[in-house]
Amino acid sequence: MKPIAILCRPDWQQHIRDNAYQADVLSDPAQQYWVEALPQPFAIQFTGQEETAIAQATEALWAMGIEFLDWFFTDRESGEVDRRLAQLQISPDYWQAIKNSWDRTEPAEDLSLHTRFDLAVTDEGAIKLLEINGETPLLGAETIYQWNWYVDYMQNHQQSALPLPSDASQFNEFWEQIVAQWGRIVAAYNLQECGISFLVDENLEEDLEMAMQLIQILLDDVDPNIYTQIVYLRGLKDDRGRKIQQGLGLDEDGYFVDHANDRIPVLWKMYDWSDLQNDMANDGSTQVFADRLETGEVKIIEPLWKQVLSNKGALAMMWEQFGDSEYGKYLLPTYFDNATAVDATKLLFDMHVRKPLLGLEGAGISIESGYGALEQKESFGYGAEGFIIQDYIELPQAFGYHYVVGSWAIDGVAAGVIIRGDTSRITGRHCLIIPHIVSNEGYIPD
């Protein structure tokens, strides 16, 4: 694994606008979100052996996640599952619905579309799990655009001063694997009859872009006749602040309804379960909504059981369950911050990372030692629910950026990677998207 300097293509902004969702942010040089906005752009080169190792780690971590959830939702003693849900600070009103979501086989199983594992891949070859993005895994648009970058570079820029290796490929099967999983969901949920609605936050352009890309994949490569629609979280307003389209609603029986007040049988969402549950509590609709979710009649992607997998507290439970197993080589020692075990206390006085149970995009994370915080991100309200502490691991660096490998798992299959870089050791919302290639050219074995 090594960084390589690449050409800043003369037409890179136009190429993004012509070939990418997230085109505005990717093509804006001021935001420095896409690597070609830098004075010296770069990519990360993996060897074929490293590609295989990341794929194996990803599929092993997915298998571990399934084993973990089977354990999590099994009462060996009365009340064990409830105690685990309480430890993750999940509202008790939804406990039965969450249990049903994992156990359900009829009506149709609660299916997941995709999951992203954030990994530290060290120069020494270690692969360690940092976080699981299971509930609202963004970066699909960026994953696909890096493929378009690779194709354009190989076709049109190999005569430049900075060509890619002649044997270059890319670990990127995201589109193909999403097609396959959409096919399973279409069949299981009978989307030809009921269609699917895509819920987006009207204030977040990336939500709409991700939804539109998934709709394109669904319609172009699975079935062009499936009915799809965008539903806005709060609705749309005109320039004068007058509402011109209703947002997502809930009827008296606990069914989601769209702007036309029609029930939504299948919903894809880019909105956290915890936020959605808080909204229901503020609206006084918790019980009717929870009761409806228990029945499984409304299908939501990602499903309720993903709320457990995405909670940072799950990482502490996974370490306790699997730290000494075959999966342990991919895990970092992790504990709830109020744990009293000797190893947890020792970690508090060593270098560690403190993470809120529900935080996203680096919010509320701090790097600490026994002397206090060495680096931290703004909390944006996260943290009241509690924290975990995780052993600190140094991220690899390239051209002044620390970078994290996001590895996709779709139906248990490794489907490619997307790399994010940050000048901070805590990868935040305003990060850098770094493309990658796979090549053995220039690799010098130890």
Image (spheres, rainbow, N blue to C red):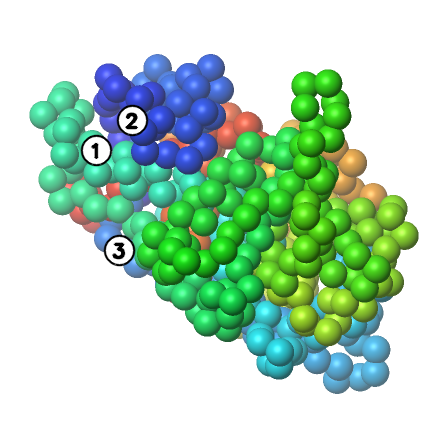
Q: Is residue 279 visible?
A: yes
Asked whether, in this view, residue 116 is left or right of residue 283, the answer is left
Residue highlighted by disc 3: 49
Judging from the image, what secondary structure is the residue with disc 1 in? helix
Tag 2 and tag 1, C-beta contact below 8 Å: yes
As measured in the structure, the alpha-carbon distance from the residue carrying label 2 to the one carrying label 3 is: 31 Å
Marked residue nearer the N-terminal end (2 or 3): 2
Q: Count of labels shown?
A: 3
Asked whether, in this view, residue 50 is left or right of residue 255, the answer is left
| Amino acid type, callout 1 | Asp
Residue at 20% from the left image edge and 32% from the top image edge: 153
- In the displayed structure, 71 sits above or below 10; it is below
Percent coordinates x, y for residue 372 in the rendering: 74, 33
Q: Is residue 345 visible?
A: no
Percent coordinates x, y for residue 54 in the rendering: 37, 55
As measured in the structure, the alpha-carbon distance from the residue carrying label 3 to the one carrying label 1 is: 25 Å
Residue highlighted by disc 1: 152
| Amino acid type, callout 3 | Gln
Q: Nearer the viewer, mark 3 or mark 1?
A: 1
Local packing at callout 2 (Cα closer than 10 Å; few below 14, some 14-19, many 20+) is: some
Judging from the image, what secondary structure is the residue with disc 3 in? helix
Residue highlighted by disc 2: 15
Residue at 28% from the left image edge and 34% from the top image edge: 149
- In the displayed structure, 310 sits above or below 192; it is above
Location of residue 429 by image quarter: top right
